[in-house]
Image (spheres, rainbow, N blue to C red):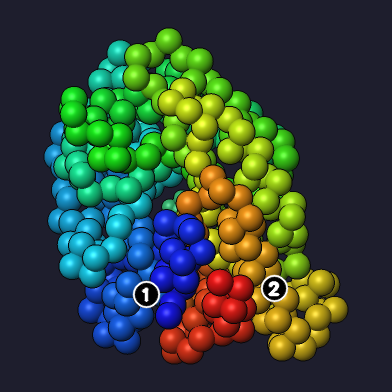
Amino acid sequence: DGLHSLMVAAGKLYFGTAMETNNLDDAAYQVIASNKNEFGMITPENSQKWEVTEPTQGEFSFTQADQVAARAKANGQLLRCHTLTWHSQLPSFVSTGAWTPEMLTAVLTAHLTTVVQHYGGQCYAWDVVNEALNEDGSLRESVFLTTLGPDYIPLSFAVAARASDPGPGAGAANRPKLYYNDFNLETNPAKAEGAAAIVRLVRDSQIPDARVDGVGLQAHLTVSQTPSRADLAAILRGFAALDGGAGRVEVAYTELDIAIDRGTATAAAHNQTQDLEEQQAAEYAAVVGSCLDVDACVGVTVWQFTDKYSWVPATFPGKGEACLFTENFGKKKAYESVLTLL
Ligand code: XIL
């Protein structure tokens, strides 16, 4: 048994991982990534982002993400699709354009419609809007906010809803779940309240078809700063009480990793390597355990399962070792603790 099969036995939909085209030819990596007992859900780490799928206005490219999707399909794995409206990894034609509201509405609508239709029937979920919040819970400055105001958010959800509607008779099961996704929702109450406000904004919007089905908690965490299992479960329950316009929202951990920072005082207090790895293992179990504790939590995705491909060291200097497997694909204490929990 592995992470996914045990997660399913525990009543959840999946345990998943991010994967990218540069991982496809790594045989040792694929032994684990292709094993549906371990990972039943795949998120393309970068290849569905706007800069990849529409680098130049009106010129779409799905070659990379299609490779990831094809591999997942061949392995019998589902796909979490990621991401549509985001300020980052945005091609310069969007971020530096001199847009009127009408023009940017057309650009956004064309992008979301084309990408969502291309992946029609293939996505369990779409991260429709990603990282729209500042840490204080207000909306983040971006070309979208500046040009369109907060309405760009319900607009994005409405366009994704229409583009992914399989039509009458197809049934709700064939529609991807439409998610709002962000980081630090686990640790910052002001930002979590901002995410709740986004769900209400979409629900109360006058734009036809706008709805939110899920809130994704990225869960990019740091060892010794992860909330307790009970506190995490309370945060999940807070979101699950919200109506996104089509009923209560579901929740998921969408990009879990828990980085070790060997430079901090806290890390120095845990002066032995072993202690930090044990602490990390306990925190992984707290996160996965909180999902088990909340019915509305459908699953957990790790943002790569091996330190070999983790984004953490390159992005946060001094931090690393954030994944369940070592660079050489050895199972860490964190892996064993999650497996034991399940
Ligand atoms: C990261 C990828 O892991 C990196 O490879 C890339 O260089 C930058 O983006 N929040 C998100 C993800 O929603 O898309 C980001 O992924 C990590 C933070």
Q: In the figure, is residue 291 to the left or right of 147?
A: right
User: Could you say whether the residue bearing mark 2 is in a helix, strand or loop?
Assistant: helix
Q: Residue at x 17, y 50 (%)?
A: 62
User: Quick one: 41 or 180, which is closer to the camera?
Assistant: 41
Q: Residue at x 63, y 45 (%)?
A: 236
Q: Amino acid at mark 2?
A: Ala
The 10 Å Cα crowd at callout 1, few under 14, some 14 to 19, many 20 or more, is some
Measure the alpha-carbon separation of dots 1 and 2: 22 Å
Q: Residue at x 61, y 50 (%)?
A: 294
Q: Of label 1 and label 2, which has the lower sequence position?
A: 1
Q: Amino acid at mark 1?
A: Asn
Residue 104 at least partly seen: no
Query: Which disc, if any, is residue 37?
Result: 1
Q: Position of residue 222 (x, y in %)?
A: 67, 64
To which quarter of the image does residue 43 belong?
bottom left
Q: Residue at x 19, y 41 (%)?
A: 120
Q: Position of residue 68 (x, y in %)?
A: 24, 62
Quarter of image, ligand 1:
bottom left
User: Quick one: 141 or 187, which is closer to the camera?
Assistant: 187
Q: Quadrant of the N terminus?
A: bottom left
To which quarter of the image does residue 267 belong?
bottom right
User: Quick one: 26 or 210, which is closer to the camera?
Assistant: 210
Q: Position of residue 166 (x, y in %)?
A: 19, 32
User: Could you say whether the residue bearing mark 1 is in a helix, strand or loop?
Assistant: loop
From this view, report whether residue 95 is shown above or below residue 152. Answer: below
User: Quick one: 286 or 60, which is closer to the camera?
Assistant: 286
From this view, report whether residue 168 is shown above or below residue 223. Answer: above
Q: Position of residue 292 (x, y in %)?
A: 59, 58
- Residue at numbered disc 2: 282
Q: In the figure, is residue 92 to the left or right of 166?
A: right
From this view, report whether residue 277 is shown above or below residue 204. Answer: below
